[in-house]
Amino acid sequence: MGTENVTLFLAMLAVIAEGAVLVALVVWACFRRNPRVVAARGVLVDGFSPVAVQLALCVALIATAGSLYFSEVSHFLPCRLCWYQRIAMYPLVPILAVAVWRRDPKVRYYALPLTVVGGLISTYHVLLEHFPSLETSVCEAANPCTLIWVRRFGYLTIPSMAWSAFALITVLLLVAGAGERRAARYEEEPDTVLEEVR
């Protein structure tokens, strides 16, 4: 499989990730305003929270494998911001793997800081790609952060794909936390939780 096919595959996954993040944002924004959304949120949380950490691990694995493919197989030289994003993404693989193995519901407390920092770095990197004049001395002149190795669907670049992965992992960890809180509330007040679903 060549670089073109790999970038297309990763770009399609990034679009799916962005769609999932968008749905989560819409549900969160409408949560307090619409009773139907309250019920839909409960169904989504109940459906995804048991597997949210496993899905987050899959996203981290794919993002890590993709970045390694780009640098080691396609020979795209990572800039300094790419390395910082890797520093945030790579530890997520063992952290989430151990959390899945130990069934640790508190993983969000030590994984979310990495996803938030990685997402902020990705956001800055995407801004630099669109507005090269914003670049300071963060990257080297020989390997600028504004160099675009891949562009898919007119907007997806390697940093924006990384942003999609960080955003989806963040949403999945928040869903896992919401599921944990919902389960605890169900134990205390089962009628209230059941009423939300109806």
Image (cartoon, rainbow, N blue to C red):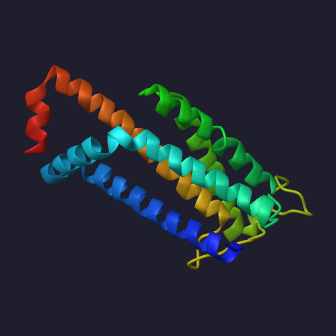
Question: Would you say 186 lies left or right of 126 here?
Answer: left
Between residue 100 and residue 193, name the one nearer to us: 100
User: Which residue appears farthest toward the top when viewing the image?
Assistant: 188
Number of numbered discs present?
0
Between residue 31 and residue 197, name the one nearer to us: 197
Image coordinates for residue 94, horizontal then vertical, percent: 61, 35
- Residue 28 appears in the rendering: yes
**Residue beneath the point at 82% across and 65% down:** 75
- Residue 145 appears in the rendering: no
- In the rendered image, which quarter contains the C terminus? top left
Image coordinates for residue 163, horizontal then vertical, percent: 58, 56
User: Which residue appears farthest toward the right when viewing the image?
Assistant: 142
Looking at the image, residue 23 lies above or below residue 153: above
**Residue beneath the point at 13% across and 24% down:** 189
Question: Would you say 121 lies left or right of 135 here?
Answer: left
Looking at the image, residue 44 lies above or below residue 182: below
Between residue 77 and residue 65, name the one nearer to us: 65
User: Which residue appears farthest toward the front when viewing the image?
Assistant: 1
**Residue beneath the point at 49% across and 30% down:** 101
Question: Would you say 50 lies left or right of 109 here?
Answer: left
- In the rendered image, which quarter contains the N terminus? bottom right
Image coordinates for residue 20, horizontal then vertical, percent: 40, 58
**Residue beneath the point at 48% across and 45% down:** 56
Residue 2 appears in which quarter of the rendering? bottom right
Image coordinates for residue 103, horizontal then vertical, percent: 43, 28
